Image (cartoon, rainbow, N blue to C red):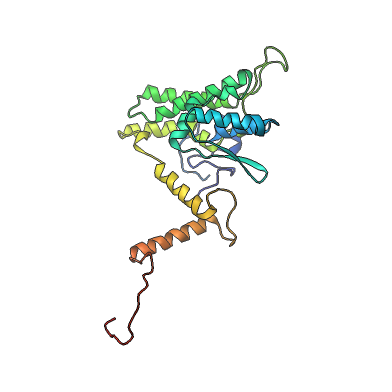
């Protein structure tokens, strides 16, 4: 649809950052036209690898979600484990309250839990009605530090008492995280100049539209695809074009059956 995929070499909508460099918070990427849910995924990837996952970890995680009043279940799709997709309010509650350190041992678990809480704090800043220049500058520093903590490598001597376990890899830094640290602060400054803030905008309608597309074209899952050899984007646009045609031309949405008397010319 005119933009590169998130897994392409030049993935970003707003700059020419290469995928291999999106972890690097020392580089400056200005907002220019491009000529080119990760915390949970990383946590569950760690847990699913463990042999006691199905019998012990899975029910414990589901219970932890129940305790914070969030509906959540693991389920198997073929040979892979998947889990309930969380929407806005449940995601925020999870970031704020889920006991990560209960499932990841030692200081690494505590640090990952801090990572979740810090992201929640940064997220709430985006919803403030007004931010000063100093607050925006501090937000930019904090988001970059957050990402540097995210891909922190193991420090110290292996198997020593001073060793500090690493968290995740540089390759785990997603396009969304790059935008969060390198472009959102610029958007905040640009909006402030015209008396607006990010709070003015919402992606809920886009999320709803995406949800409807997923349900319609994939039967309720993002896995799989069609069998007609056409791209998903083509099918979506064709469907919406038909909907617009029916709307503009006032096409009936249902057929009303009735009997017609062929001898009655007024029928």
Q: Is residue 183 visible?
A: no
Name the outermost residue toward the bottom.
263
Work out which quarter of the rendered image holds the C terminus and state it.
bottom left
Q: Residue at horizontal 53%, vertical 53%?
A: 219
| Residue 180 versus residue 248 in the image, above or below | above
- Where in the figure is residue 222, as x and y percent of width and height? 55, 48
**Nearer to me, 217 or 164:** 217
Q: Residue at horizontal 46%, vertical 38%? A: 87
Q: Residue furthest right?
A: 159
Residue 78: horizontal and vertical position, in percent?
Answer: 66, 46
**In the image, residue 259 above or below residue 55:** below
Residue 235 can be seen, yes or no: yes
Residue at x 49%, y 24% (from the top left corner) = 117
Coordinates of residue 66 in the picture (x, y in percent): 51, 30
The residue positioned farthest toward the left in the image shown: 266
- Residue 132 at what x, y percent from top left? 35, 24
**From the viewer's perspective, is 178 left or right of 50?**
left
Q: Quadrant of residue 158?
A: top right
Q: Is residue 90 above or below residue 242?
A: above
Q: Is residue 88 left or right of residue 46?
A: left
| Camera-side residue of 211 and 167 | 211
Quadrant of the rendered image containing residue 82: top right
């Amino acid at each position: 649809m005119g933009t590169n995929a998130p897994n392409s070499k030049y993935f970003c909508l707003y700059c020419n950052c290469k995928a291999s460099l999106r972890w690097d918070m020392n580089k400056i990427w200005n907002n220019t036209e491009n000529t080119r849910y990760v915390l949970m995924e990383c946590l569950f990837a760690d847990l699913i690898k463990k042999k006691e996952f199905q019998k012990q970890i899975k029910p414990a995680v589901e219970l932890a979600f129940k305790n914070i009043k969030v509906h959540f279940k693991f389920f198997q799709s073929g040979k892979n484990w998947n889990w309930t997709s969380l929407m806005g309010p449940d995601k925020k509650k999870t970031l704020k309250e889920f006991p990560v350190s209960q499932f990841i041992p030692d200081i690494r678990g505590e640090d990952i839990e801090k990572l979740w809480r810090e992201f929640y704090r940064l997220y709430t800043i985006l919803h403030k009605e007004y931010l000063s220049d100093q607050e925006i500058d501090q937000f930019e520093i904090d988001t970059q530090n957050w990402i540097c903590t995210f891909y922190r490598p193991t420090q110290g001597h292996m198997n020593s008492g001073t060793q500090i376990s690493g968290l995740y890899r540089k390759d785990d830094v997603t396009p969304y995280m790059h935008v969060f640290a390198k472009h959102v602060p610029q958007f905040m400054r640009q909006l402030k100049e015209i008396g607006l803030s990010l709070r003015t905008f919402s992606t809920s309608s886009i999320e709803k539209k995406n949800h409807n597309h997923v349900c319609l074209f994939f039967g309720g899952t993002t896995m799989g695809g069609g069998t007609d050899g056409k791209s998903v984007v083509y099918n979506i646009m064709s469907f919406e074009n038909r909907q617009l045609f029916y709307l503009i031309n006032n096409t009936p949405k249902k057929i009303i059956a009735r009997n017609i008397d062929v001898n009655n010319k007024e029928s």
